[in-house]
Image (tube, rainbow, N blue to C red):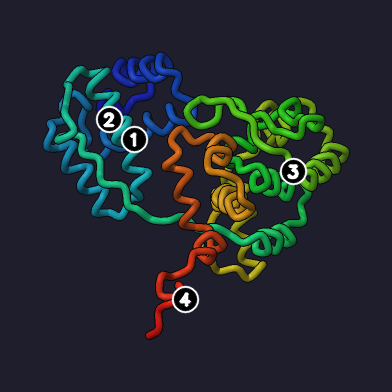
Amino acid sequence: MPQDLQTHSPHLQKMKFEMELRGLPPQTQKLYLSHLRLLGKHFNKSAPELSPNELKFYLHYRIKSGISYSNINISCNAFKLFFNKVLHFNWSDDVIVRPKRPKKLPYAFSQDEILTILDQVSNLKHKTILLTTYSSGLRISETLNLRVSDIDSQSMFIRVNEGKGSKDRLTVLSLENLKLLRLYWKLYRPTDLLFPGPIEGKPLATRNIQHVFQMAKLNAGITKPGSVHTLRHSFATHLLENHADLRTIQMLMGHSDISTTSKYIHLSTAHIASVRSPLDRGDFHA
């Protein structure tokens, strides 16, 4: 087995050091290392032996295989850190070629669709997780890592600790969600993690909630594409339709760039429907 595929190889150990030095979240570190192992396994050779062309061929192979943009984007981040900071190859963007991001609009569920899906979830813990995710615009990883102390029922906000980019933020706490959270707490009595998993000190696995959501969506007869993350898109879209300004939505969502938040204008059917065509200006007759 090539040395770089081994868990304790010097190169992977140095990579781990560089990631920790930059404060990358544990899940990101795990993803980066898995991409490096996949690369080494593909060529069955040690990473320092790879040529620039081999890396380009590998990225091309992944793109042609239909791998998602986000997956390839993560691998490019891992390769830039590994080859340029650990191995000091200083390969340019002409070697570690990042594909152009496809400009696809995310989907959003209507409020009726969300309620219909949640009606299909009988487990109180799972329903509370999904409602919290939607009503506060959280990423599922943020929901599952919430602690009891993060719920402030007096000020009616939820504290998100070390969200994407290791940023803390505050977001809204829905009154209806608070009622469900209190019911959930009375039944489960969590003391630290709000939604602990079967392993002590660890939250529920994301894949479990994704499965619950997809089954509920199927049982609700909703064929629109979407995952648990679509609940977050729906939150932002519904805020916009209720006349919240983009800057406020940006803060609640934890977006670094307001252009990321602006995409929800395109998802808001109410916003689009409020615009009149110039053909209907009143003094134009076909």
Q: Earlier in the sequence, mark 3 or mark 4?
A: 3
How busy is the neighbourhood of tag 3: few (under 14 within 10 Å), some, or many (20 plus)? Answer: some
- For the N terminus, which image quadrant? top left
Q: Which residue is mark 1?
A: 35
- Find the residue positioned furthest to the front: 283
The residue mark sitting in front, 1 or 2, is: 2
Q: Secondary structure at mark 4?
A: loop
Q: Secondary structure at mark 3?
A: loop
Disc number for residue 282: 4
Instruction: In this rendered view, identify the residue nearer to me: 103 or 201.
Output: 103
Instruction: In this rendered view, identify the residue nearer to me: 281 or 118.
Output: 281
Q: Position of residue 5 (x, y in %)?
A: 31, 28
Q: Position of residue 166 (x, y in %)?
A: 51, 25
The residue mark sitting in front, 2 or 4, is: 4
Disc 3 to disc 4, how far (Cα)? 43 Å
Residue 147's image quarter?
top right
Disc number for residue 174: 3
